[in-house]
Image: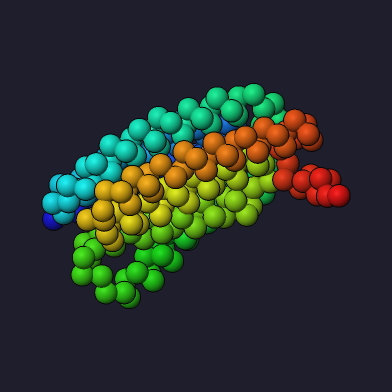
Amino acid sequence: MHEFLFINGLSGLLIITALLVILSKKAINSAIFYSAQSFVIVVLFIFLGAQTGSGELYLWSFTAFITKVLLVPFIMYTMFRRLDDGELGSGQVMPAAFSAIGAALIVILCYAVLSRVTLPSAENLKPALAISLAHFFLGLSCIVAQRNILKQVFGYCLMENGSHLTLAILAPNAPELVEIGIATDAVFAVAIMAVLGTRIFAKLNSLDARKLTTLKG
């Protein structure tokens, strides 16, 4: 029982690190916070594997460490440091205080919904599951609300981390190939989006998504 409490409590760090990723004004800081968040997910996978007896989650934690903690932040840093578009915070639509309140409301709403759903395999992990779902929607809101293309890339990464943890909680014995595929998809997605962001900046000298309309025709 104490293990479940630890997992549920540790998952709360995902919301904190997600807010730090979204609200950071420098791309390098967002990449560092994303790496820290991914490390929290790796630790969660290890404890979930020990609690559920799933050997697959240990392999999943290893691949997640290589891809999410090391490779993806490295790609972000390598590509994004070339782009000088001022502070990332300049494109924020919602102030920090409202972002924190919004995140809390999303978590509460997700938990309220899950509390009415019967999940025998994850009954003791509903708080962590609610946070993972809320984390997905927080990343989605980042994509929708942020005007800076780099922040939208980070929003995708947050969505991916949320769905990653959701699957680990609901299907801890998923085949290894599925887990490795999910763990590595962020690498290719971020690499492609980073290249596109670089091309867009070279063309427009800006990363403001609103200016993409000038590319028409």
State the count of labels: 0
> How is the structure coloured here?
rainbow
Tell me if residue 148 can be seen: yes
Horizontally, residue 36 falls left or right of residue 175, namely right
Task: Give left or right: position of 21 versus 170.
Answer: right
Which quadrant of the figure has residue 108?
bottom left
Q: Position of residue 14 (x, y in %)?
A: 39, 46
Q: Position of residue 114 (x, y in %)?
A: 34, 69
Percent position (x, y) of residue 198? 67, 32
Task: Quarter of the image for the N terminus: give it.
Answer: bottom left
Residue 117 in picture, x, y percent from top left: 31, 74
Asked where in the image residue 111 lies, by quadrant, the reply is bottom left
Residue 118 or residue 74, whichever sits in front: 74
Residue at 32% across / 71% down in the picture?
115
Query: Quick check: 65 above or below 172?
Result: above
Is 67 situated left or right of 52 in this image? right
Residue drawn at x 57%, y 43% is 153
User: Looking at the image, which residue is at 65% across and 42% down?
Assistant: 149
